[in-house]
Image (cartoon, rainbow, N blue to C red):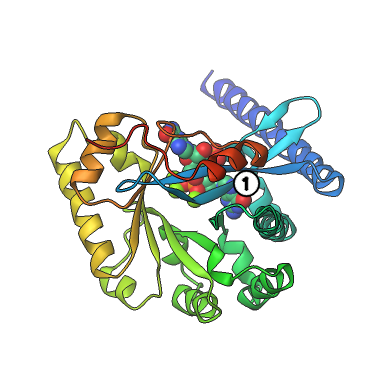
Amino acid sequence: QAKENGRNDFQYYTKEMNAQSHEMLNLEEELRRAVKAGEFVLHYQPQVDLQTGALSRLEALIRWQHPERGMLAPGTFIPVLEETGLIEPVGEWVVREAVRQCAVWKEMELPPVTVAVNLSVRQFANLNIAEAIERIVTEAGIPPACLELEITESVLMADAFDGAEALRALSQRGLRVAVDDFGTGYCALHYLRRLPVNTLKVDHSFVSDLEGDPTTAAIVSAIITLGHDLGCKVVAEGVETLAQCNHLHRLGCDLAQGYLYYRPCPPEEIEPLLQGGNHGHYKVQ
Ligand code: C2E
Ligand code: MG
Ligand code: MG
Ligand code: MG
């Protein structure tokens, strides 16, 4: 009896595993096809200055324009791109596309804007990544400081990755550096102090707990103070309510990014916003 059960469990388990790896393989094949067919697009989400309401910074976020399944968010496919190494060509495309878009906006004589791009740890396998990015920016004729590279705190702390060296290489070329999802990755503060970082992004898990939980509010306050002591701008991610926005402003946070203001949207929807300059709505009390 027990033996039989055991065997059934085993069969059930392998069946489940097969289904899972089958799905992965399909996704991998589909992604290889998507890379060739150029099915990725970038959406842009504004970051709003909490003091002035000005909009001069955007985060570029990848989407997969799937021929049958529509617009897909990166949560499902970025891990597969990372596992397969496809993140290297796709990541390079992301940088090129964001820089190309920046140059188009410059050509249109829109007010200058800083665009932030997310980098995966795998992209640092290319030791010359900073040089490669610098070349892309220079060829497009935009100042390097118009591009900010977002690296998550966990990537920075990953073993076998000299985060400090990688960030220095970017910074020496005039490119900007942001630490993404800050507060979730146990970054040693003495380590952070030695890094050339321009921006700290407070992870949205802290922002969503800000109102209900005094401990979270204390942590966010500490992150903002730390960021300022390091000479960084502090951006809050995932700001969804006016209460959060006001609270962040009281704590001295510089910028906010979230659905309260704008969802990530295609570049043509960004243009009127950049043109508009200041945004009085949702301005803090
Ligand atoms: P992230 O860099 O932390 O990006 C912020 C995520 O929060 C985005 O999800 C954005 O759409 C979402 N978000 C913005 N405002 C709000 C809000 O008010 N509420 C909530 N609940 N969410 C909000 P998205 O676009 O699905 O991207 C997820 C993650 O995928 C990103 O997290 C980033 O780690 C990764 N990613 C996106 N684009 C790229 C890329 O081009 N390259 C790499 N390597 N990773 C990327
Ligand atoms: Mg990011
Ligand atoms: Mg983030
Ligand atoms: Mg995040």
- Residue 248 is situated, as x and y percent measured from the top left of the image, at 25, 43
Q: Residue 177 versus residue 250: which sits nearer the camera? A: 250
Q: Assign a secondary structure to mark 1.
A: helix
Location of the C terminus by quadrant is: top left
- Residue 66 is situated, as x and y percent measured from the top left of the image, at 76, 32
Q: Residue 263 versus residue 92: which sits nearer the camera? A: 263
| Residue underneath mark 1 | 78
- Residue 276 is situated, as x and y percent measured from the top left of the image, at 51, 41
Q: Is label 1's Cβ within 8 Å of ligand 1?
A: yes
- Residue at horizontal 57%, vertical 58%? 120
Q: Residue 75 versus residue 281: which sits nearer the camera? A: 281
Outermost residue toward the top? Answer: 1
Tell me the crowding category of disc 1: few under 14, some 14 to 19, or many 20 or more residues within 10 angstroms, Cα based: some
Q: Residue 170, located in which quarter of the rendered image? A: bottom right
The answer to whether 257 appears left or right of 4 in the picture is left
Location of the N terminus by quadrant is: top right
Q: Residue 186, located in which quarter of the rendered image? A: bottom left
Name the kind of residue labelled 1 in the image. Answer: Ile
- Residue at horizontal 79%, vertical 41%? 39
- Residue at horizontal 40%, vertical 31%? 260
- Residue 56 is situated, as x and y percent measured from the top left of the image, at 48, 52
Q: Residue 231 versus residue 205: which sits nearer the camera? A: 231
The answer to whether 275 appears left or right of 235 in the picture is right
240 relative to 200, above or below: above
- Residue at horizontal 29%, vertical 30%? 242
Number of numbered discs on residues: 1
